Image (cartoon, rainbow, N blue to C red):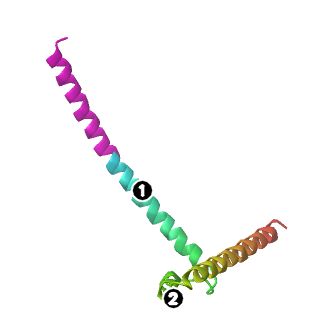
């Protein structure tokens, strides 16, 4: 085979791979969008079950509005509160599971 035939073959192969990647990438994006929308709907269903004591996302705004010296403590307090709420929710879920198995 001559060198120019190898170069042409390589270019055709690269174009074919590029086309495959473009087609496969668009399908992957569609699948990703479908997955995100299904997870979002599941999250909204779950968030309806969470008690009203759940900390809003605006807590980060409250932390940044504090003086610089108080921010680390506010971050720790916020994280501790979120951990406590997660543990309470987990405990409640475990109790519900125990009740259904009995």
Q: Quadrant of residue 73?
A: bottom right
Q: Quadrant of the N terminus?
A: top left
Measured as percent of width and height from the top left, residue 82 is found at 63, 77
Q: Which residues are magenta?
A: 1-24
The label on residue 66 is 2
Q: Quadrant of residue 93?
A: bottom right
The Cα–Cα distance between marks 2 and 1, rounded to whole angstroms, is 38 Å
Q: Earlier in the sequence, mark 2 or mark 1?
A: 1
Residue furthest out toward the top: 1
State the residue at coordinates (79%, 72%).
95
Q: Which residue is mark 1?
A: 32
Compared to residue 36, the image places residue 11 above or below, namely above
Is 47 situated left or right of 8 in this image? right
Front residue of this view, candidates 37 and 90: 90
State the residue at coordinates (78%, 69%).
100
Q: Main secondary structure of the magenta part?
A: helix
Task: Inspect the magenta stretch and tell me whether residue 90 lies in it.
Answer: no
């Amino acid at each position: 085979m001559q060198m120019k035939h190898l170069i042409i073959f390589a270019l055709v192969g690269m174009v074919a791979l590029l086309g495959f990647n473009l087609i496969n990438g668009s399908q992957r994006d569609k699948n990703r969008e479908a997955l995100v929308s299904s997870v979002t709907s599941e999250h909204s269903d779950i968030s309806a079950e969470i008690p009203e004591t759940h900390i809003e996302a605006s807590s980060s705004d409250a932390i940044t509005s504090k003086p610089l010296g108080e921010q680390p403590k506010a971050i720790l307090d916020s994280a501790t509160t979120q951990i406590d709420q997660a543990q309470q929710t987990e405990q409640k879920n475990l109790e519900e599971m125990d009740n259904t198995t009995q």
